[in-house]
Amino acid sequence: MSDDTKIFLSESEMPQQWYNVQADLPSPVPPCLHPGTGQPLTPPDLMPLFPMGLIMQEVSQERWIDIPDPVLDLYKLWRPSPLVRARRLEKALGTPARIYYKNEGVSPAGSHKPNTAVAQAYYNKEEGISRLTTETGAGQWGSALSFACNVFDLKCTVYMVKVSYQQKPYRRSLIQTWGAEVFASPTDRTNAGRGILEKNPDSLGSLGIAISEAVEDAATHDDAHYSLGSVLNHVLLHQTIIGEEALKQMAIAGDFPDVVIGCTGGGSNFAGLALPFVREKFAGRDIRLIAAEPTACPSITRGKYAYDFGDTVQTAPLAKMHTLGHTFVPAGIHAGGLRYHGMAPLVSKLVDDGVVEAVSFSQNPVFDAAVLFAKTEGHIPAPETAHAIRAVVDEALKCKETGEAKCILFNWSGHGHFDMAAYDAYFAQKLIDCELPQADIDEALTHLPQVGG
Ligand SMILES: Cc1ncc(COP(=O)(O)O)c(C=O)c1O
C-alpha cells in the first residue's frame, strides 16, 4: 500500500470517456414523462430546452461515451483532481479505517459542478445556441455554468434561490465576474416567479421554483436553452470522470474502497464518484455505497419513490424518483445545494434496487464534522460536502468500535470559502437542527401527480 498522502494522475492518464451505468443496470430506469400528456418523453420533446448532443446522452444505453477534445482541454485546467489519504483525520478519530477523498474543490468554481458545466456549454455552443439559463442553490452551480459559458462565449442567466442570494453574496459576485447575469428567485421576470410572489411575497425561494423560472425563460426564447446542474442522466454521466479517475488512483494507492460516500442534493457528485464503483459492485466486488442528505430535505430517507414533477410549477418533465413532492419548500439550511425536493432518477433506481443506501444528518452534527475535517486536513469543506464527511466520520467511528480496518472513499465535492457565514452561525450556536414533521411531508406528498407506477 502506498505511503503517499496525495495520489495524482498525469494529464495523459485522464480518462477519455464518461461511463454510462445504464448499460449495466439489470432493468432500465423508468422513462421521464411529458408534463402535459403524461406520455414517455421522446427526444423531440426535449429539443426546446436541450441540444441534441445532450438529449442523445440522456437516453443513451452505450456503456462508454467519448469526451470531446475541447472538453478534455478544459478539464486540464483542474483535472485530474487529487485523491488524498486523510491520515490526520484518521489519527484524530483513532480509527483503524483508511479514509481517502477525491478533492473536487480544486476546480475554478471550487466544486465538482464544472465537470458538467463545460460539457453542457460545449454541446450548446456546437448547436448554435447563444444563451443558457439555469437555477442555482448555493451558487456553486451558477458560478460553474457562468465560468463555462464565458469560456465558450455564451451568455448566461442565473436564477439564484433567494435565501442563498442573501446568505452567499460572494458566490453571486463570482457568477458576475465570469460574466453571467444573476437574479434572486422568485423574480418578477417570469410567470412562474410572479405567481409565487403573488401567493407569498416573502418567499425565500427553492430550487424547484428557480428551475421553473429558468425553464420558462429558455422555453420562451429561441436563442436560449436551459441547463441543469444535477438530477438528469447526462449530468451524472459527465460527473463519472470523478469515479473513473478514482479507480485508477486507488489502484496506484494499492487499496480499494469497502465504502463509497457522497452527499446528495440532486445526486450528481455522489453518482459521479459512485457509478464506476456500482459497475465494480455488479461485477462482484463487496462495496457499500452511501448517500448523505440533510434531515431538512430527506428525499431518499423519507420521500416516496414515485413520479413527480422536477419543478414547482409543473413545467419540467415528470421523473420517477425519490421525492418529497414538488411543492415542498425545505427550511433555509446553509447547505443550499442540498435543498431539492427530488433525487436523480438513476440514484433513486439504485436505492430502490438496494444497491445504494442513504443516511441523513442535521446541521450541527454536520458542522461538527466539517470543523474536525478543517482542523485535521486543513481544507474547509462546503456545507454540502460536510454531510458526506459526517457520514465518513460515523463509519470510521464504527470501525473504531469493531476494530475493522475498512477503506472509506468519499467525494469532497467542494470548498466552503464562500460559506463562512454558515461557519459563523455554527460557532455562534445559531444553527437550527431542523426536525421535519411527518405531517409536512405527508401534506406535500398529497400533491404528487396521479401517473405511472
Ligand atoms: C459543493 C456541493 N456539493 C454537493 C452539491 C449537491 O449537488 P449534487 O447532489 O448534484 O452533487 C452541491 C450543489 O450545489 C454543491 O455545491
Image: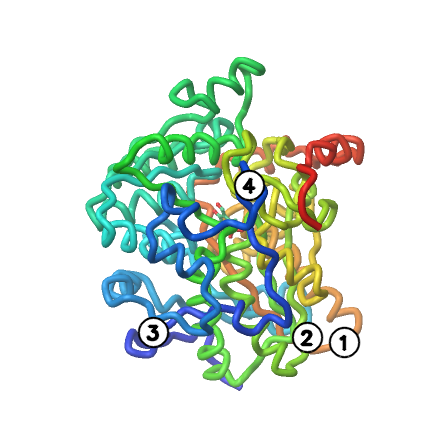
| Mark 1 or 3, closer to the camera | 3
Residue 96's label in the rendered image is 2
Disc with the residue nearer the chain's start (2 vs 3): 3
Q: Hey, which quadrant is residue 203 in on the image?
A: top right
The residue under the point 56% across, 74% down is 24
Q: Which of 234 and 28 is in front in this view?
A: 28
Q: Is residue 46 left or right of residue 131?
A: right
CA gap, disc 1 and disc 2: 7 Å
Disc with the residue nearer the chain's start (4 vs 2): 2
CA gap, disc 4 and disc 2: 42 Å
Are the residues at dot 1 and dot 2 in contact (C-beta closer than 8 Å)? yes
Residue ID for mark 1: 403
> What amino acid is labelled 2 in the image?
Pro
359 versus 221 height, above or below: below
Q: Which of 363 and 161 is in front in this view?
A: 161
| Mark 4 or 1, closer to the camera | 4
> What amino acid is labelled 3 in the image?
Gln
| Mark 3 or 4, closer to the camera | 4
> What amino acid is labelled 4 in the image?
Gly
For label 1, the SS is loop
Q: Hey, which quadrant is residue 60 in on the image?
A: bottom left
Residue ID for mark 3: 16
Residue 310's label in the rendered image is 4
282 versus 159 height, above or below: below
